[in-house]
Structures are given as C-alpha cells and as structure tokens.
Image (spheres, rainbow, N blue to C red):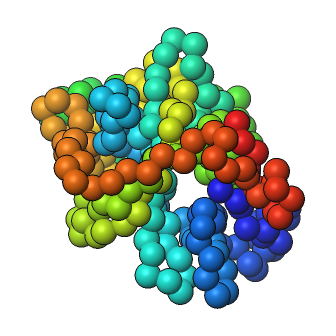
C-alpha cells in the first residue's frame, strides 16, 4: 500500500493546512484514468476477528474501508490481530490512548448530566464500568495527553500493517448495508499485548456516550464480530512473498517495503 503524497503532512501547525483529507492507499493491479488511490473512509476494530486463516481465529481485527473517488470499487483491508504477553505495540497504544481520552470525556459528561455521586451513579446505571478510569487527572497526565493529541495518526504504519502480502476475495461489509466489496486480508497478523487487548475490550464493551447511553453492540459471548461464514464456491487469491514487490523496491514510488 502506498500513501499518496500530501502537502500538509509536514505542516507543524495543522490549523494552517488547507488541504487536509483522509489517508489514501493504492491497490495492486488497479490502473484507472485519474488516480489509483482510494480514500480511507472508516477504521473499525472488531473483537474477536471476523476472518480466519487456515482455520485459525484471532483476538481482534482492524478493518479499513476504502472508496475510490471515481470508480465503483469499494474495498477493505483486514488486519488480523494477535495478542501475547510480549506483543506490546506502541503505535496501537497511541490509538488506545485517544479512545481512552474520548471514553473519559464521555463518562465525565454523563456524570455531570446526572449530577449524582459517582458510587450511586454507576450503581443505578447498572454497568460494570471502572470509575477509576475517569478520576481527576494530575498535571503529568494532562500534559501527556496534550503531547499525544499533536501526533499524526498513520494507519499504514508498519507496526499497524505488518506486511504488504494478502489474501484477496470478493465478499461484503459485515455490517449494514452489507455492501459487496473486495477484501484484502493481510496474511500476517498485527501484534499487540494481552493488556492492550484487555484495554480494547473494556473501551468497546463499557463505553457510554455523553447522554449516558451504552454504545456497544456486543453479545453474551463478549463479541462485536459477525459469525464466521464458510467461503463455499467463492475463490480466494493469495499474494505471497516472492510473487510481487512493492513500488518502493521496483523504483516507481515511495510505498511500503516488503517485510
């Protein structure tokens, strides 16, 4: 995947940038008049994963839905996520930190809306939420969040997208309107730590918005993922190492390197 050159990427004060737009990626063998790049529309995280590789299931999955500006070709990159005790991922932690910040803001808004004591508030709400997550922040925490807020998010970072090789097939989005799309599921999982997986589950399953409404759609099995469906007669193509090289290697662009 290549990141389209973007003049605002190196602008320190993003408020002065007038050409901000979504991240963009190109896809193999996608030659159309105009641009080969597709805009990144959504960045979803499902727990557990919604794809299996040779029968192996995964702890979570990142799904990056893209849409080409002129061609009717929606596509999604699926990045399977594997958690382990030694898999800490600094780039993924930056995502979790931003989710945690919004999570805390919404809890504070809800708490202020109801104007109750914290203990009675959570008891009446009936949610298993750890109120310690929104205790008053000290100066160091506030300063740390301010620094993180200026960090530009790169969804195509090597730590988040560990390979350029993939399984490709035609399927559908796993949530309404279930539109037909082309899937590119990376053939190597992204690594995170077990603690990061626990934090992700807590953020997804116990989040409430500023009006005190639970937002999670998880089921009794603590899952927000659709059930796995068999492929049936649908074909799957596997683009593996040695079958092609990146644009960076071939000298036609500054894309991701083959891992």
> Foreground residue, 243 or 92?
243
Based on the displayed image, in which of its 4 quarters is residue 111 positioned? top left
Left or right of 172? Residue 9 is right
Residue at the spot 60% in from the left edge and 67% down from the top edge? 29
Q: Residue at x 53, y 86 (%)?
A: 70
Q: Is residue 158 positioned above or below 254 on the image?
A: above
Q: How many marks?
A: 0
Where does residue 195 sit, x and y in percent of width and height?
47, 19
Residue 12 visible: no
Residue name at image x 38 percent, y 50 percent: 236
Asked if residue 141 lies left or right of residue 119, the reply is right
> Could you tell me which quadrant the N terminus lies in?
bottom right
Residue extending furthest top? 85
What x and y, as percent, mark residue 243?
63, 47
Give left or right: position of 220 versus 94.
left
Say if residue 230 shows up in the picture: yes
Is 148 situated left or right of 12 in this image?
left
């Amino acid at each position: 995947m290549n990141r389209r050159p973007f003049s605002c990427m190196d602008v320190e004060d993003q408020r002065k940038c007038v050409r901000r737009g979504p991240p963009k990626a190109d896809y193999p063998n996608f030659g159309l008049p105009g641009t080969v790049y597709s805009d990144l529309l959504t960045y979803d995280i499902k727990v557990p994963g919604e794809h299996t590789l040779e029968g192996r299931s995964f702890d979570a999955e990142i799904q990056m839905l893209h849409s080409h500006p002129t061609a009717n070709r929606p596509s999604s990159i699926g990045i399977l996520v594997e958690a382990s005790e030694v898999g800490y991922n600094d780039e993924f932690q930056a995502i979790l930190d931003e989710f945690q910040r919004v999570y805390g803001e919404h809890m504070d808004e809800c708490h202020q809306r109801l104007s109750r004591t914290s203990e009675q508030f959570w008891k009446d709400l009936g949610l298993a939420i750890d109120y310690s997550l929104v205790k008053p922040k000290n100066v160091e925490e506030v300063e740390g969040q301010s620094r993180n807020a200026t960090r530009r998010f790169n969804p195509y970072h090597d730590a988040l997208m560990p390979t350029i090789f993939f399984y490709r097939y035609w399927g559908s989005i796993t949530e309404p309107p279930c539109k037909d799309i082309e899937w590119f599921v990376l053939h190597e999982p992204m690594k995170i730590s077990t603690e990061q997986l626990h934090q992700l589950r807590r953020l997804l399953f116990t989040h409430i918005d500023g009006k005190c409404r639970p937002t999670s759609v998880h089921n009794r099995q603590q899952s927000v993922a659709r059930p796995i469906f068999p492929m049936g007669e649908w074909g799957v193509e596997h683009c593996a190492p040695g079958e092609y090289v990146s644009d960076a290697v071939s000298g036609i662009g500054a894309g991701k390197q083959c891992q």
